[in-house]
């Protein structure tokens, strides 16, 4: 049994964690989830109680239906992915390998739910959670940009900040942060990747989205792993490389 009184979270003793976990239900708007997130993964920072909560979050997810377990899975994945953790904390991928393996199984079950066909945003969140739990760098924390339909990245040549936009407002790069306005500044058309030439994580994600019936997500992935021209200096760069460079800096 976990002695929560001997553990701490963002606000002190973790004695309140069991009660919050019990109160948290399938509704993502349940206030208990906000309280748990604030305590266990506060602005991306994790604490001793955060890792201790992984088995409980896995059990909570197991108790919920595959269609209703997103909140414990997303919180657990954020805890595992965090690099802002207590000094000398063991690598969670090693210390909690069994719990993470169970969480991965539960995420896979959730991703296979037919109801996600009409919820591409939630699908992307769960797919990002899967990658985070697997220890995949960059995309375990940055994939949610797919739902926002933009990534803000620096040009690798002139370092100008570019908005790489794909979705409702078009498919282009621009340095104008108000690109949604009709009078927005200079735009350069994006060059999507050819799915047949995708490799590695790009190929895996694209093929998975298609297999899961997420055709809109698959289409957006071709732009994330495609190319863009800097709207300032016209240099051509790979969008995913620019995203990875920002993530590592």
Image (cartoon, rainbow, N blue to C red):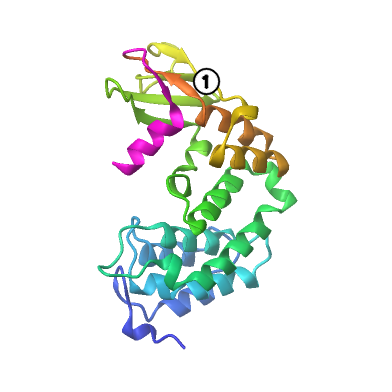
Q: Does the stretch in magenta take in 234?
A: yes
Report the residue at 39% width, 38% height from top.
Answer: 244
> Horizontally, is 202 left or right of 186 in the view?
right
Structural crowding at the residue carrying mark 1, measured as other residues with C-alpha within 10 Å and reported as few (<14), some (14–19) or many (≥20)? many
Report the residue at 51% width, 75% height from top.
Answer: 55
Residue 208, horizontal then vertical, whole percent: 66, 43
> Horizontally, is 248 left or right of 205 in the view?
left
> Horizontally, is 11 left or right of 165 in the view?
left
Q: Which one is nearer the viewer's eye here, 32 or 165?
A: 165
Residue 58, horizontal then vertical, whole percent: 55, 70
| Above or below, comparing residue 36 to residue 136 in the picture | below
The stretch of residues the image draws in magenta is 233-249
Report the residue at 32% width, 60% height from top.
Answer: 45
Which image quadrant for residue 168? top right
Q: Which residue is mark 1?
A: 171
> Horizontally, is 137 left or right of 157 in the view?
right
Residue 56, horizontal then vertical, whole percent: 51, 75
Q: Disc 1 on helix, strand or loop?
A: strand
| Above or below, comparing residue 50 to residue 220 in the picture | below
Residue 68, horizontal then vertical, whole percent: 64, 61
């Amino acid at each position: 049994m976990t002695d929560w009184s001997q553990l701490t979270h963002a606000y002190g003793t973790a004695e309140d964690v069991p009660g919050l976990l019990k109160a948290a239900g399938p509704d993502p708007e349940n206030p208990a989830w906000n309280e748990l997130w604030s305590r266990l993964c506060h602005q991306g920072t994790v604490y001793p109680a955060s890792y201790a909560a992984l088995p409980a979050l896995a059990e909570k997810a197991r108790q919920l239906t595959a269609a209703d377990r997103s909140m414990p899975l997303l919180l657990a994945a954020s805890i595992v992915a965090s690099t802002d953790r207590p000094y000398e904390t063991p690598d969670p991928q090693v210390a909690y390998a069994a719990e993470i393996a169970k969480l991965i199984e539960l995420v896979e079950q959730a991703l296979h739910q037919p109801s996600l066909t009409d919820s591409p945003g939630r699908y992307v969140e769960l797919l990002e959670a899967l990658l985070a739990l697997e220890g995949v760098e960059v995309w375990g924390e940055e994939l949610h940009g797919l739902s926002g339909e933009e990534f803000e990245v620096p040009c690798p040549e002139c370092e100008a900040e570019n908005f790489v936009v794909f979705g409702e407002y078009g498919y282009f790069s621009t340095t104008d942060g108000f690109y949604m306005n009709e009078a927005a500044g200079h735009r350069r058309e994006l060059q999507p990747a050819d799915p047949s030439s995708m490799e590695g994580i790009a190929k895996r994600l694209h093929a998975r989205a298609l297999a899961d019936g997420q055709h809109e997500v698959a289409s957006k992935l071709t732009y994330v792993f495609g190319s863009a021209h800097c709207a300032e200096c016209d240099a051509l760069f790979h969008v995913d490389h620019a995203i990875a460079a920002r993530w590592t800096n």
